[in-house]
C-alpha cells in the first residue's frame, strides 16, 4: 500500500484454532466511551478459519487487513458466529492515520477460546437454538490477551521479518501500535437480550 494512501493496514498474529473464530475491532468514540454502531460502521474484522496443519499441529499465522483511518477498540472475540467474549469494561483502543501500517501484536486467542468454552459449559449455553448469539461480558472475562509491541520487542522484530518477506508494498513502514485503556457501553436487541453492541446502548459503568 502506498505511503500516501487514504487507508491504513493492520497486522495481527493469531493462533489458529480447530473452529472458526473472529476478532472484531469496532470504530470507537473515545470521549463518549461508545462503539460507533450505525448503518455504515467502520470495523476491522479478522476472520480466522479453523485450520490444522498437515502434521496435526495447530500453527500460528499473521493476518493483515486494510482499514479506514480512525480510532478503534477491541470489541469481542466470537467463535462460530454464535459465542462471544465482549471486552466492554477492559479493552484497548488505538488510532490509525492514513497510510499507516501498524502491528497490533500477538494475540493469545487460545486463552480466550478456552475461557469461552468453559463459560458456555458453566452457563449451560453449549447449544445455540436458532443460531442465537450468546455474549459473555466483563468482569467475568479476561481483557484482550495481546502483546504490547515496541520498536525492540521480540514480537515486533518478528513481525518486521514477516513484513520484509510478505508485504513488499509496505516499504518497511510497519510500526508498533500505541494502545490506550478503553471501555464501552453495551446494549440490547429488540428482543431484550443483552449483546455486545446492540440497538439500545447503555453507558459503561466503572467496575460493572
Image (spheres, rainbow, N blue to C red):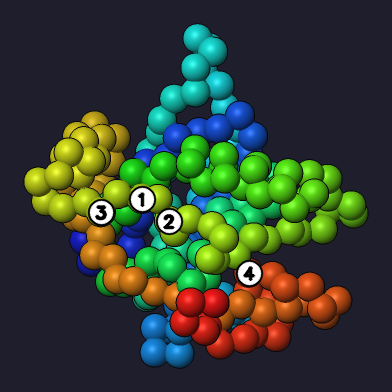
Q: Secondary structure at mark 2?
A: loop
Q: Position of residue 17 (x, y in %)?
A: 55, 32
Residue under label 1: 146
Q: CA distance from mark 3 to mark 2?
A: 11 Å
Q: Farthest residue toward the left?
A: 152
Q: CA distance from mark 2 to mark 1?
A: 6 Å
Task: Indicate the quadrant containing the N terminus: top left, top right, bottom left or bottom right.
Answer: bottom left
Q: CA distance from mark 4 to mark 2?
A: 15 Å
Left or right, 146 with respect to 29, comes to left
Q: CA distance from mark 4 to mark 3?
A: 24 Å
Residue under label 2: 144
Q: Residue at x 25, y 47 (%)?
A: 169
Q: Farthest residue toward the right?
A: 130
Nearer-N-terminus badge (4/1) = 1
Q: Residue at x 90, y 54 (%)?
A: 130
Residue under label 3: 148
Residue 196: numbered disc = 4
- Rendering quarter of residue 179: bottom left
CB atoms of marks 1 and 3 within 8 Å? yes
Q: Is residue 178 above or below residue 58?
A: below
Count residues near mark 4 (Cα–Cα under 10 Å), then give few for <14, some for 14-19, many for 20+: many
Amino acid at each position: 500500500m502506498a505511503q500516501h494512501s487514504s487507508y491504513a493496514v493492520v497486522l495481527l498474529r493469531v493462533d489458529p484454532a480447530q473452529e472458526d473464530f473472529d476478532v472484531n475491532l469496532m470504530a470507537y468514540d473515545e470521549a463518549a466511551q461508545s462503539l460507533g454502531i450505525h448503518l455504515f460502521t467502520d470495523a476491522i474484522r479478522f476472520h480466522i478459519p479453523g485450520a490444522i496443519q498437515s502434521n496435526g499441529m495447530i500453527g500460528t499465522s499473521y493476518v493483515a487487513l486494510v482499514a479506514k483511518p480512525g480510532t478503534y477498540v477491541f470489541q469481542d472475540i466470537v467463535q462460530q458466529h454464535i459465542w462471544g467474549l465482549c471486552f466492554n469494561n477492559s479493552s484497548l483502543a488505538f488510532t490509525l492515520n492514513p497510510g499507516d501500517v501498524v502491528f497490533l501484536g500477538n494475540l493469545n486467542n487460545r486463552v480466550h477460546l478456552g475461557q469461552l468454552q468453559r463459560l458456555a459449559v458453566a452457563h449451560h449455553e453449549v447449544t445455540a437454538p436458532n443460531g442465537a448469539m450468546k455474549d459473555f461480558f466483563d468482569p467475568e472475562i479476561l481483557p484482550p490477551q495481546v502483546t504490547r509491541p515496541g520498536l525492540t520487542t521480540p514480537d515486533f522484530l518478528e513481525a518486521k521479518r514477516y513484513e520484509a518477506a510478505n508485504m513488499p508494498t509496505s516499504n518497511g513502514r510497519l510500526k508498533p501500535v500505541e494502545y490506550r485503556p478503553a471501555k464501552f457501553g453495551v446494549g440490547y436487541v429488540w428482543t431484550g437480550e443483552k449483546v455486545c453492541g446492540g440497538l439500545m446502548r447503555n453507558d459503561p459503568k466503572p467496575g460493572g
